[in-house]
Amino acid sequence: MCFGGGGGGGTINMPDTGAYDRMLDRQIAAMESERDGVVQLKQAELQTAQQAQQQALTQLNDYRTDRAEEFASVEAEARRLMNIVGAPPPEESAKAPVVGDSRRSSSRKRGKRGLRIGRSSASSSGYGTGLNIT
């Protein structure tokens, strides 16, 4: 009892592996195209977002430029009106301080008595001065 042996009557057929290779290549190509489609979609979304951001920045820049030009024109108009009207008169508190000989008046005493500080309210002692013990 010999199994498989003998007579040489059988032929071995090699299966067609090329068909399996082609099927694998088609599956790989389908997965890659799906992946590439998702990547392209995300890339398009990113570009759209960047364009919207750039447009917003351009609008902000235009707005700031308009505001600066408006401020400059208002400032120029104010300067022009100020030149027409002139400077306001000085306030009472804007006088120059009194220095030197201009402080002297004819009623002041000369010598040592002229150096004393006149304190009319301190000439007599009032209530609450000194030591109070109760």
Image (cartoon, rainbow, N blue to C red):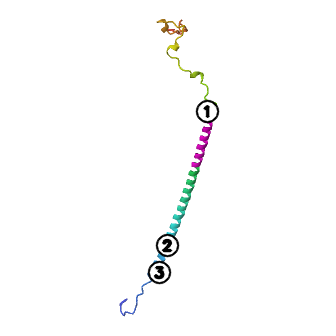
State the residue at coordinates (53%, 67%).
37
Segment colored magenta: 61-81
Label 1: how many residues lie within 10 Å, few (<14), some (14-19) or many (20+)? few
Please tell me whether mark 1 or mark 3 is closer to you in this view.
1
> Would you place residue 14 above or below residue 105 in this image?
below
In this rendering, the label closer to the viewer, 2 or 3: 2
Residue at horizontal 52 percent and vertical 61 percent from the top: 43
Location of residue 105 in the rendering, given as x and y in whole percent from the top left corner: 54, 10
The answer to whether 103 is drawn above or below residue 86 in the figure is above
Label 1, on which residue?
A: 83
- Main SS of the magenta part reads helix
Picture coordinates of residue 39, whole percent (x, y): 51, 64
Q: Is residue 88 above or below residue 65?
A: above
Name the disc covering residue 19, or none.
3
As for residue 22 lying within the magenta part, the answer is: no
Which residue occupies the foreground of this view, 7 or 50? 50
- CA distance for labels 2 and 3: 15 Å
Residue matched to label 2? 29
Quadrant in which residue 44 is drawn: bottom right
* Residue 68 seen in the current view: yes
Q: Which percent across, then down, holds residue 82?
A: 62, 33
